[in-house]
Image (cartoon, rainbow, N blue to C red):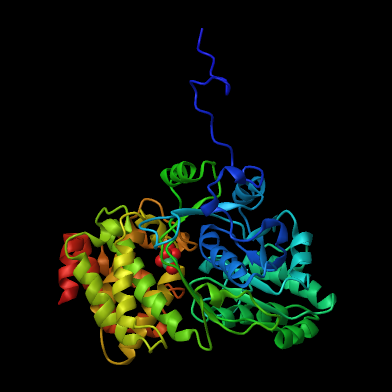
Amino acid sequence: MAANTSATDPAVPARPPRLSRATLARVPAHAHPRVPLDERRTGIVHLGPGAFHRAHQAVHTEDAMAAAGDPSWGICAVTQRSRTVVEQLAPQDGLFSVLLLGQPPPGHPPARVVGALTEVLSAPEEPAAVAARLADPDVRVVTLTVTEKGYRRDPATGGLARHDPLVAHDLAGAGAPRTTIGRLVAGLRLRHERGGAPLAVLPCDNLPANGPLVRRLVQDFLAALPGGDALAQWVDARVAFPATAVDRIVPAPRPLDLERVTGLLGVRDAAAVAAEPYSQWVIEDRFPAGRPAWDAAGADLVADVAPFETAKLRLLNATHSALAYLGSLAGAPTVDRALALPGMETFAEELTSHELLPTLRPCPGLDLERYRARVLDRLANPALGHTTRQVAADGTEKLPVRVVAPLREHLAAGRVPQRLLLVLAAWMRHVTTAADLDDPRAAALRRARAHAGAPARAVESLLALRAVFDQETAASPEVRTALTAHLTTLTRHGVTAALRQAAG
Ligand code: CS2
């Protein structure tokens, strides 16, 4: 007979229970939420509570509530698509932990439970409850992390992609909204009807001028709605859309991270996230109905976010994409391993110092050269295990902002930045050869695959993608020549030779 393996058998260690309010007592006190859970009230609705939200805004908000002794900024987390997030968080009463990858700052535990989430809703399943929350006057801030593609912008106009089938569905108004902007507008409409309390909408995705962008998308949506005028006027007058720059590397958690959390906290946590110790948040200070004391918890509240945002998108995100494409072509599974490839550190140093830093405006209170050097140290953190595959995803959404924008500035000044062009050539090689393409425009990209062996034709075909390259950049003979030269070298001689060539 097999041995009895019941939970009462002292020979079999009991499986730790799952994190929840009922099991919190098992967690060491230093890792407990920093706000009294019974005192929290909901003051924020967050759309898209993926790993990044949990490791960034939720942590900053809990710290702000604790610093100011104001528990009225609990977060109602609204998932946009994924049932998994509800299944992770709801049985845990919204509790989750954040594991630090690398050396925790002095006095910080390596893992902590965050109690910022007061409620978890699923937008596809509970549209009325979501709209009601957005209309609730106690809710004074809405934050969003829905990734670049979640906004459904039209790359040609920068406004709402009105002909996108899901946007068209939401504009037709038949049934519950299916896009983030459609859901936001449904909530704003109800808020307007219920008295019109002011609100701030704060998008936290890696897009330049993200606040004004979302304002424009909402206004485009309302302009296309019959009878949307009154609502549009109210939005203009009472809803602020501050811009923000967010910065924390949050790789998808690995099984070993979840095991470490169990080891450190004594409970299992299906919603745990893992992040680098560094975290920064720069926020435009425009909140008509108040905000958490984020400034008392390390965030920078400023009048103009733009220079910070550009610095972060270029020094960190452009370099990240460079390492993702060049690294995966050379077989590096993670960003830190990519940086350790022969010639790559020098390339990253030169890309950031010679081609990115010179395009930046001064950021009050931030030493850009120190930030640049720190970014390279952060990307080299071997504890992150951030896969090049994860960062390489959605290139058609990310590259225009990170790489094509600084490229255009160089071209306008009469310079041809070879390293930025090599990053684009590496993306071209990636999309023409990768086994699985994770990109909202994968179908269009696959058409270039027929030219994988003919660099000039591949360049030609990919330069025609208006979502990535504007007309002028695509028509530049210097751009075409450099891309073809880099793609040829990558195809025939590999990454190390291409790095050497770009260094000139
Ligand atoms: C990354 C970002 O996946 C990506 O595209 O570049 O998610 C990056 O880790 C964050 O922006 C860091 O703040």
Which of these two is toward me, 2 or 224? 2
Residue 258, position as x, y percentages in the image? 47, 45
User: Is 164 located above or below residue 111 in the figure?
Assistant: below
Residue 189, position as x, y percentages in the image? 78, 74
Q: Answer with left or right where residue 180 lies relative to residue 397.
A: right
User: Is 152 located above or below residue 158 in the figure?
Assistant: above
Which of these two is toward me, 293 or 147? 293
Tell me how many marks there are. 0
Which of these two is toward me, 365 or 137? 365
Q: Going 37% across and 77% down the picture, which residue do you hit?
A: 314
Q: Answer with left or right where residue 455 lies relative to residue 216.
A: left
Q: Please identify the quadrant where the C terminus is shown.
A: bottom left
Which of these two is toward me, 167 or 247? 247
Most extreme residue toward the top is 1
- The quarter holding residue 424 reads bottom left
Q: Going 45% across and 68% down the picture, which residue do you hit?
A: 279
Q: Answer with left or right where residue 398 lies relative to residue 134.
A: left
Residue 12, position as x, y percentages in the image? 50, 23
Most extreme residue toward the bottom is 413
Does residue 169 appear anywhere in the picture?
yes
Does residue 453 appear anywhere in the picture?
no
- Ligand 1, by image quadrant, is bottom left
Q: Going 74% across and 62% down the picture, which residue do you hit?
A: 130
Q: Going 84% across and 78% down the picture, which residue do you hit?
A: 195
Residue 391, position as x, y percentages in the image? 40, 61
User: Is 423 located above or below residue 124 in the figure?
Assistant: below
